[in-house]
Image (cartoon, grey):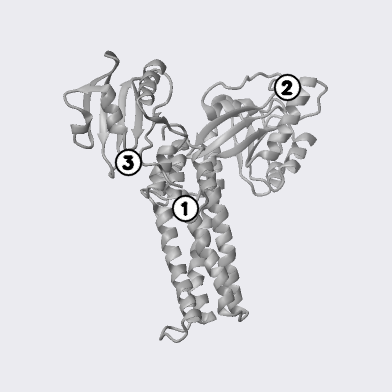
Amino acid sequence: MEVKKLDTIAAISTALGEGAIGIVRLSGDQAISIGDKLFSGAKPLKEVPSHTIVYGHLAEDGEVIEESMVTVMRAPKTYTREDIIEINCHGGLVSVNRVLQAVLSHGARLAEPGEFTKRAFLNGRIDLSQAEGVMDLIRSKTDRAMNVAMRQVEGRLSNQIKRLRQEVLETVAAIEVNIDYPEYDAETITQDIIKEKMTPVLAEVESLLVTAKQGKVLREGLATAIIGRPNVGKSSLMNSLVHEAKAIVTDIPGTTRDTLEEYVNVRGVPLRLVDTAGIRETEDIVEKIGVERSRQALKDADLILLVLNSAEPLTIEDEALFDAVSGMDVVVIVNKTDQKKRIDMEKVHQLAANRPVVTTSLLFEEGIDQLEEAISGLFFDGGIESHDLTYVSNARHIGLLNQAKTRALEAIEATDMDVPVDLIQIDVTRTWELLGEIIGEDVQDSLIDQLFSQFCLGK
């Protein structure tokens, strides 16, 4: 895929809406000349030193349309490795759109979603994994997620992948020399040598995949369902975690008729909380629909917060909920400890089957810290803070690493079965190719287009 040299793109790079400043970004060979058609300052933009910002006005047909500051950045030391100007104008839909329309009328083209980052990739400034890291950085919902994305943007994953590919490539090259040029005085590649070289590659791929669960949680968040019988405190729990009265709380069973969703940050773990209607048998048509949606939310959840009432004995419905979440990640919350205890805690621990059990009084905000600690510990166990690890969070990367692991393992197993070297080479070469797809080597144009279409305009 080639970028036309004379094709200059433009887009609004700040969020739409009212604000102090709005930015219109241009990138391409004509970016500075297009800016000069509109900008009037102490000197033309073409005479302004690179990486400086100048004050002036934008005018069309002799009429001033904006007061602005314009940043000039000349290739190749720019985000896209093309000439870039950024027009800083007053924030607001009308002012920013007027500037955008002006630059488009003077020869720029409206950028596609993610096209600035796409050009950075196509022009060789970043690889595909770093480009995807930019998108993750924008979408980060917690500090931990942002740190993981930042390391990917900085090239930590791509550097590791490039090093692994080089190790595999050296093995492929040695095999090909032995096969194609046996008369050369080169090291004879045997099955044992291939096994010796591919075993550490396999180990490193497996090490990356170990981080995949944590990385994927940080990137996408945990779909978390709050379940329990009616009136046990589910909505109060959601309000406590969100720190806002999102859900209606009353003593009347069946108050929550539908599922409510909200994103929260629990000690760096992004949760997509779903407060469900109380799961029980009911004749109320509206409540019955809510109960069915609750059951669906239960099936789709990564984490279950199962709420019980400390002031009531365990019921058949409570026990049925434990059966429904068998084999899932669950934190059991025994609420209303401010009231006289009637629940059998020994039975609760038995039903929880070694899963975390936390006691709370949501009315008095007691036990929330212990609950947050239990949620964080369930998924990260304190290891996420290591700055030495490269976390894999992207589903595409995880899939390719799993395929590379399979092919590397097949190559190693083939050496034990005394398979001819030229046949083992097929798996070794495919391992190298799969690792290359992570960083964008030999990747199809259609995949590139699909990936960058997920970006926001202006990035």
Q: Please name whichever residue, 449 or 63, is drawn nearer the observer in this view of the structure.
A: 63
Look at label 2 and name its amino acid: Gly
Question: Residue at coordinates 50% horizontally, 35% vertically from top-left?
Answer: 265
- What amino acid is at disc 3? Glu
Give the Cα separation between the discs numbered 3 and 2.
60 Å
Pointer 1 with pointer 3, Cβ within 8 A = no
Residue 24 quadrant: top left
Q: Quadrant of the C terminus?
A: top left
Eye-nearest disc, 1 or 3: 3
Mark 2, residue position: 254
**SS at mark 1 in the image:** loop
Q: Residue at x 45, y 49 (%)?
A: 128
Q: Quadrant of residue 87?
A: top left
The front one of 143 and 69 is 69
Alpha carbon distance from label 1 to label 2: 52 Å
Q: Does residue 137 lie above or below 105 as drawn?
A: below
Q: Secondary structure at mark 3?
A: loop
Question: Type of residue at label 1?
Answer: Gly
Circle 1 packing at 10 Å, graded few (<14), some (14-19), many (20+), is: many
